Amino acid sequence: MKRLLVSGFLSLSLLPLAACSNNSSPNSSANSAAQTKTFVTGAIPDQDAEKLQRLYGKLSQYLEAELKIPVSYKPVTDYTAAVTAFKVGDLDMVWFGGLTGVQARLQVPGAEALAQRDIDAKFHSVFIANKNSGIGPINDVKELTALKGHSFTFGSESSTSGRLMPQYFLQQAGVKLEDFKGQSGFSQNHDATIALVTAGTYDAGVLNEQVWQKRLQEGKIDRSKIDVIWRSPEYYDYHWVINPSVKQRFGDDFPQKVQAALMKLDPNVPEQKEILELFGATKFVPTKNENYARIEQVGREIGKIK
Amino acid sequence: MAGRGSAPTPIARMSSDPIISVDRATLQFGQFTALTDISLHIAAGERVALVGSSGAGKSTLIRLLNGTLEPTRGEIQAFGQKLHQLKPKQHRQIQRQIGTIYQQLHLVDSLRVIHNVNAGQLGRWSFLKALISLIVPLDVATATQALAQVGIPEKLYDRTDRLSGGQQQRVAIARVLVQNPMVILADEPISSLDRELSREVMEILCNCQSSQTLIVSLHDVDIALRYCDRMIGLRRGRILFDAPTTAVSSEMIADLYRL
Amino acid sequence: MSRPAFRFISPSLQWGMIGLVAIALSLWQAGLFQQTVVNLNGFPLLWRFVAASVHPDLSYDLLATTLQASLVTLAYAVCGTFLSVTIGAIAGVFCSEVWWLEVLRAKRLRYFGFHSVRAILAFPRAIHELIWGLFFLNIWGLDPLVAVAAIAIPFGAITAKVFSEILDETPRQPLLTLINSGVAPITAFFYTLLPQAFLNLLSYSFYRFECSIRSAAVLGIIGAGGLGYEILLSLQSLRYEQLWTFFYALLILNGGVDIASATLRHQLGCASRIDLNSHRPTKRNIPNRRIFSLFPIAIAGVALSFWYIQPDLSKIGSPRSQQLLNQIVQTSLPPNFTGMAELIPLSVETVAMSVLAIAIAASGGLLLAFPAAQIFLPGGLLNRRGKANLFPPVLLAVARIMLLLCRAIPAPIWSLVVLYILFPGILPGAIGLGLHNLGILGRLFAEVTENLEQPPLKALSAGGTPDSLVFLYGVLPATMPRFLAYTLYRWEVCMRETVIVGLVGAGGLGRLLTEQLSSFDYQSLIVTLGAFLALTFLVDWISGRVRRSLRSS
């Protein structure tokens, strides 16, 4: 009995070497092989995870057919993780927001803003309020002071349309975060903001206009309970950012190829129309790093970029 | 015993040179002086009894002799070597020739008897052999023979904590027999045993080879008189007398236990 | 304390009063009497959440996802436990007193070596698994390796500490006997101390496995996958029916592991998990022979788990990881101390959060522990004359399920739920932590109650004392000191865990940490982490002091 016990103990302590080497060596090589061959896309989780999965699944299929290489989509849990995964090299191309895109490019020298939707050059946030809160429509930035004394929620900490620009506009109106009732919330994504304000958990909130419009079309919004109180001025937002490492793996002209493939999405082809619809766009247009200088400047002002 | 004849005895001297000698040793624990100015010389093959009331310093002296404790002043020599000036490896070499049976036995309860007996020869084994033996007991014959000598060969594969007190005492003796040292130190080996068992244990200890030296602390003077040829009386950390058992008088004994 | 005038104030009473004051101050810090903390408008959403518990989503697709996620969580826990026990076994030897003192026979060097090993191990222990996870994410990317290492490193350090304590508390004389008969110290160590301590070490390893399961679920939140990940996603998209399916899976997983571990530990005869304040070797039965036939199964389980999650071990030493590590170190240095002033109020908030959390956990645990222990069952300790009555068993089942639910759901998830009806701040964080720890403490309390020494209670009972008085004079006095010790120990854990509820928007240093993480402001982050470490050590020190003073009284 004792003998068994001790032998078990000894073999247990010898096991890590044996177990690890046996199992991992074949699949680690398989992993790295897969990594060099597969083009991995990702996205900041700004909406409902299931919708993202469907959207990027279709996009991956399209890119796979266009680029003739395996393309996969890897989901992440939050905005920061998307930037980190892009930095580490787990994600080759990511659909970033304005702020996260700048953060990512600052950490990966040579990363390029590749393309954006037609709407992203003139993007807006919408401030929404629960009808019971008694907050009326706002006509000017300065009137955001009406939100003082009410509970308020942002989206993710790193969201451009759900946090950065709204906080910037609030700052211009002289509203500080401490002026809200309780502490301001971070719902983590735009759909959650709609749900929390509809339920009345927060009197008001702010989100990306495109998601708002889309949910309106889908009839997912109960306008007897919530409505838009203010539409922000325009700014640059979402864009695709590609990692420079793809040039080594797929050729120097690879970013151009991907850009071309994205441009080629045609609303007249039913399959591709669906993808564009899921993105809430009519087409993709080229973009460049310089377009986001203002976002970077605001980011530094708010303290989200150091 | 197997291995006994072939056991290495590198430092054996059959002459009357002292095998252990203590020179003016004093031992203090902080303020408390446990032993004062002890000097004694023990020759190979002697059977020495340490007697005295509890707290007289018998256990402390035994631990001084086996090198567990270091004297505050004075020095201890074993086999002609000054114990506390040795390098650890040489120190271990010397200690292997001194086997100790403790009053509290200090057996590994959760191991089987054979492992506890084999622990006596670990000093001669390599680390690897010791590890393997924990899984598959090695040198079973030696252990069996030692157990047979103490009268419990059937307990070889029993768990030690399932044995009675007397049986555990025998396991502790068997461990020292397997170690086969030049000197056996025994601290109150019969204190928890009845008369019959006490006799048996003393027989076992005294029936060891004639070249082996036995130093045994006892509270029972009659047993000491019967089995030993020399008696050292300790009182309050000092040697009161050191004489052949034949020369010990009842006055000396009375003096020893006087309050 | 022992001055005659104050003799009627026992140390426990004194500490109790200090504790109450601390709780009151913490409540004030949470803003309970100064500003709005309750958000009444959130109740409808909370109700939707609660109502969904009776009709979880049982569609085939979701069940398949659930099964897969459960397996991932289980595999992370198995791999994490295996590695942490391996690390703990090796490091535990080197930070045990007996190793330095008796085996190495070190004299002057001993203090240096011993204390430096202990000090080095204190750091990985003070940093929560989630922070480790975020760190590894930055150098290894999205790989299962991240989750396994995030469990293995802090848990390895904790295991090392406990293993060293077990070794040090194991009777040392047999070891000394062998060393003094000239056996090489290291041989003597393996021959005497390890066999003596083995069952205790094994028993603690099982307990670690239970902790690893909970930790594996938490790690899902940073994207490691498994049940925690799925739960967070459904919670963010407000899909409560799916959420409850995952909750029930987590419940089954935790319950299963707890029961298996308890059964095994019982068979080994080491019923109590961590014998905190009785510093004596556990009295044990002769272990059942069948236990040892489980070793091959355990080994197969570990191998299977590694195969299932497929961590990319080549990443550990790869040049790319090395480069990313350098990059992290470079961007974190030099530390930016400009935000120091902000750290002080946030540190106070953090401590207040941990105090409130442990207060909730201990009082809730106390309420549920006695019903959850078997003492009220017919034939049990306090109901031996009782007729067979349906009420006690039902009460027992309800109490146990509530405790299981509390501890199975990770604290940040509880906090997110509480955030429906409370404004962000330390209170939702404290409640989230409190609920999770309530489940753990309640279970520990119940175990203490069941393992009470029976004879004194039987003697009371035999003297005709009514059961209620046996409870008051026998059970309570015997269990309280251990309850207190467990509570203090858990307080240390709560302190470490404040950081993870901070990540979902509860207050304190964790909140600041999240903001700094999302701004990639590593230079300030490292200062915040430093403050966090200092707080952790402070709380450990206070808790240790109180425990010692209670033990000596």
Image (cartoon, coloured by chain):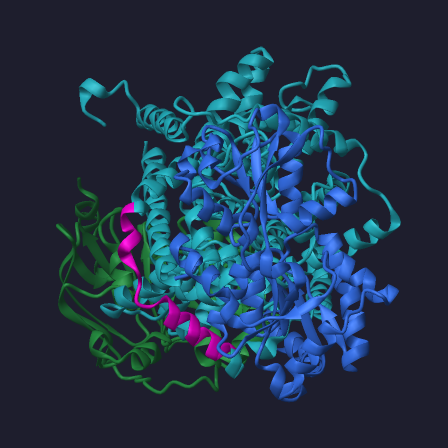
Q: Quadrant of residue A133?
A: top right
- Magenta portion: prevailing SS class: helix
Task: Check the picture and name the quadrant holding the C terminus of chain B.
Answer: top left
- Colour given to chain A in the rendered image: blue
Q: Is residue B112 visible?
A: no
Whether C336 is among the magenta residues is yes
Q: Position of residue C319 (x, y in %)?
A: 51, 83
Give, as a single range, the part of the protein colored magenta. C321-341
- Name the foreground residue: B192 vs C315: C315
Horizontal relation, residue A211 to residue B109: left or right:
right
What is the residue that sits farthest to the front in this orientation? Answer: A139
Residue at the image point whose x is 73% and y is 39% from the top: C240
Q: Position of residue A19 (x, y in %)?
A: 66, 74
Q: How many marks?
A: 0
- Name the foreground residue: C59 vs C479: C59
Q: Is residue C405 visible?
A: yes
Q: Which chain is cyan?
A: C
Q: Position of residue B207 (x, y in %)?
A: 44, 69
Residue at the image point whose x is 67% and y is 62% from the top: A118
Q: Is residue C449 above or below residue B97?
A: above
- Name the foreground residue: C346 vs A195: A195
Q: Is residue C344 above or below residue C300?
A: above
Q: Position of residue C329 (x, y in %)?
A: 39, 71
Q: Is residue C502 above or below residue B75?
A: above
Residue at the image point whose x is 49% and y is 43% from the top: C275
- Name the foreground residue: C100 vs C303: C303
- Colour given to chain B in the rendered image: green
Residue at the image point whose x is 43% and y is 31% from the top: C481
